[in-house]
Image (tube, rainbow, N blue to C red):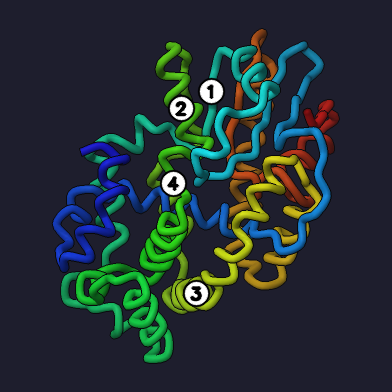
Amino acid sequence: MTAPACDRHVQGDLQNGHASRVDRCPLYLLHFARVLLCLALVVGHATAACARDFLWKVTGKTGGAVYLVGSVHLLTQDFYPLSATLDRAFKDSDLLVEEADFADLLAPTTQMQMLARSMLPSNTSLEAVISPATFALVVQRTKDLGLPIEPLKRFKPWSLALMLSSLQWQKAGFDPEIGLDRHFYDQARAEGMQVQGLETAAFQISRFDEVALDQQERLLAGTLKDVDSELANLNTLVQAWKAGYVAAIEQIVLKDVKEDPLMHQRLLVDRNRNWMPRLEALLTRPKSAFVVVGAAHLVGPHGLVALLKAKGYRVEQM
């Protein structure tokens, strides 16, 4: 079963009290891991608009260019077709680079590894590793979603947090299968364009799985407490992204630094630094590369736009 079918059926299996398809389709966990980066961007007050996309053209001294796209990982069909500027930048490129290569994500061995890392030991249940207060939040949220609690007790706190938040987003009509990442991957494959990933699926999962249990519980509790307000502002978020409204998104990213500096460091700052040598290597190519990463990676003092400017590259929003 491919990732799209897996994502669409996870909630149905849980509602029926079964975890069988969850066991067979762990790829959905990666979608949830990447969703958190989108959740960090919720904008509650974006009112300005501009005639630009969340897209920057980066040029180097050798004439190479990188189109750097800030992605929203879940969208609705209403956001298509995309702007002519995005389409032109894609057609001007001969290489697509995303956070991870979907071919890696779709591999059965990758899916099984991801599932193994998302689950608690067989002799451990969720309520044994989190507080009664947080477990009560889980019970209430699963009830609101119409899901049974028993199959979910098998998941580690971090993976459950991302699963429940993503199910809530999908219930609101936002779909990872038509997010910007998947859209351009499918288009690249259809046109025979080369595709690369900046990191592996295993590394992405490690960003969550290697944090201490108390930090995982804070992530779970915070996600469950904030999901309703995030959903209420979701439309504002994607409209700000569509308008290329950097200031609104940057303000929320910087706010997250104060609220959870550890996860901000692991999910954004460290990964941005890891990606810089790859981006600089792309700028030495004779042709353009089209790079798609979560929009949160582009803004703020530790964002890729600021890091590239500090290196002396010309970076222009389009």
- Residue name at image x 63 percent, y 48 percent: 238
Viewer can see residue 6: yes
Marker disc for residue 185: 2
* Label pair 2/1, CB-CB below 8 angstroms: yes
SS class, disc 1: strand
Marker disc for residue 215: 3
Closer to the camera: disc 2 or disc 1? Answer: 2
Could you tell me residue 253's position as x and y percent?
70, 58
Closer to the camera: disc 2 or disc 3? Answer: 2
Spatial separation of the CA atoms under disc 1 and disc 3: 34 Å
Picture layout, residue 168 above or below residue 110 = below
Closer to the camera: disc 4 or disc 2? Answer: 4
Picture layout, residue 287 above or below residue 257 = above
Which residue occupies the foreground of this view, 167 or 232? Answer: 232
Residue assigned mark 4: 175
Left or right side of 53 for 122: left
Spatial separation of the CA atoms under disc 3 and disc 4: 28 Å
Residue assigned mark 1: 96
**Quadrant position of the N terminus in the picture:** top left
SS class, disc 3: helix
**Quadrant position of the C terminus in the picture:** top right
* Label pair 3/4, CB-CB below 8 angstroms: no
Closer to the camera: disc 4 or disc 1? Answer: 4
Spatial separation of the CA atoms under disc 2 and disc 3: 33 Å
Question: Label 1 sits on what residue type?
Answer: Leu
Q: Of marks 4 and 1, which one's residue comes earlier in the chain?
A: 1
